[in-house]
Image: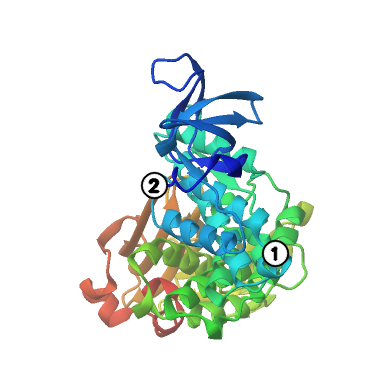
Amino acid sequence: MTQADAAPAADFPRAGLVVQDAPLRGAPRDTASLQAQMGRGEALEIRAERGDHWQVWDYRRERGGWMRKGQVLLMPKGDGASAELLAQLRLARQQWGTEGLGLGLAAAYVQAATPAELAGPGGAEALDAMGTFAERIADRASLPNAKPGEGQLAAQIDVAARYGLKFQQVEAEDGRVQVCYDGEAFRRVLAVAATPEQRVRAALALTRPDCLDPRATPREAEARDQWRQQLLAQVDAATLPAHWKNRLLMRRASVSASLAFAQARRGAGGEAAPALAEFAGILPTELTEDDQAAYADAAMRVNAARWLGTGTAARDFGAVQLVLEPGADGERCVALKEAGKLAVRRCSFGQVALASASLNREGRALALAVQPLDGWRELWLFIKSPGRDGGWRIEVMPPASAQPGLGVAEFAGWVPGGALMLLAREFRAEGKYRRSFEVLSLATLATERQSPEPALLGAFQRWADASWRSNSPVRR
């Protein structure tokens, strides 16, 4: 018995969903005039049948017509309708390209389910699926070669809009446009009897870093990160499988690092300890291949912020002293003094970490960590020129010679002799990711040797700083 045979005329009108992109015709034959092009997942009212065709009515277009029975899925009725819709929804969720149909099934379940079912596991599953379908559409629309106004993608976006889903566009760092779902279905998941995996999936979707407004003011960004932190705290990490726990901890660590920088920038403290603790809980052996980029990003954010909360106003190295002084318009200035006299001074609006300062054994070079932006930390090098009366100069070593994105340039050790320094860099900027370990000439600031792994450089094996070895996330 076919689906059509199971629907006698007395059952009309019936609800139906378009199961494949298909034409709405003016008569029950393939040569009849085209009334409209229907997209997968659109809802229709089925009013009659003739042969292999349904007579349907499209309330959105306020237009009737005919479609082949194989192009329309009859919605179940009666006591078992919600269970049948949930089973169909699970099947659609496993198939890419069926997002429009999946949204229609999820909406039909919400309409057919009782209040108790909506508040229970079935409702959570339907809402979770709805949010997942919306994210898949948004991610597809964000691909470099995507054409949201054409073809199947345009039809899916149109169907999603008909079910009340909203999308917004965010300009990414590399200039492309990221399409983002506003997350309403995921918010509702957190309010019903969802499983731990559904809850963490919702929390991660609502706190995506690539969907943050880059034009937000510092105050707006801090308030947003406080909300993200509170939302992520609602998910119990102890109840999650290892790979989902890793994803939650990576996001928590990243958000905590951003929040610590925002608080430090406005003079309200700002501690890196929470971010470091979250990052320390990640199990690298349980990371999936898909998690590698997020792990690298979390490591860079946490590493950039790891000196926050270690504030000190002065460091005395005997021969030279570092003093942190207020500058103009909220700047922080670092003064290096030699024998009590000012030798060199530099100012920044960033966070200057005097606790990170390291002077080489020869007393002619000093490294200092400075974080000017969230997720971006530079290394300031104070270098004394050769000669008895040589003066000091300051050189800034950024993570990369690119527009700031995520990145860290950090001191990794001094090579005896006073001519070389070990430098570690990691960055993601302008769509590129790179990690390098370098042996740097202090005279020319040229890289003499480098490798993507510290173990491949003998200088790192012999002279790497003990504190850097034990504390820096770049060595993960």
Q: Quadrant of residue 354?
A: bottom right
Q: Which residue is mark 2?
A: 2
> Which residue is at 50% across, 26% downward?
66
**Picture coordinates of residue 297 (x, y %)?**
47, 62
- Mark 1 lies on a secondary structure that is loop
- Viewer-side residue, 40 vs 250: 40
What is the three-letter code of the residue carrying label 2? Thr
- Viewer-side residue, 399 vs 96: 96
Q: Quadrant of residue 203?
A: bottom right
Look at the image and tell me whether residue 169 can be seen: no
**Picture coordinates of residue 182 (x, y %)?**
64, 49
**Picture coordinates of residue 36 (x, y %)?**
52, 22
- Viewer-side residue, 30 vs 140: 30
> Which residue is at 62% across, 23% downward?
63
- Mark 2 lies on a secondary structure that is loop
> Which residue is at 51% across, 77% downward?
279
Look at the image and tell me whether residue 230 can be seen: yes
- Alpha carbon distance from label 2 to label 1: 29 Å
- Viewer-side residue, 20 vs 468: 20
Sequence-first disc among 2 and 1: 2
Circle 1 crowding by C-alpha within 10 Å: few under 14, some 14–19, many from 20: few
Q: Mark 2 or mark 1: which is in front?
A: 2
Circle 2 crowding by C-alpha within 10 Å: few under 14, some 14–19, many from 20: few
**Picture coordinates of residue 250 (x, y %)?**
51, 71
Compared to residue 216, the image places residue 51 above or below, namely above
Please tell me the numbered disc located at residue 114: 1
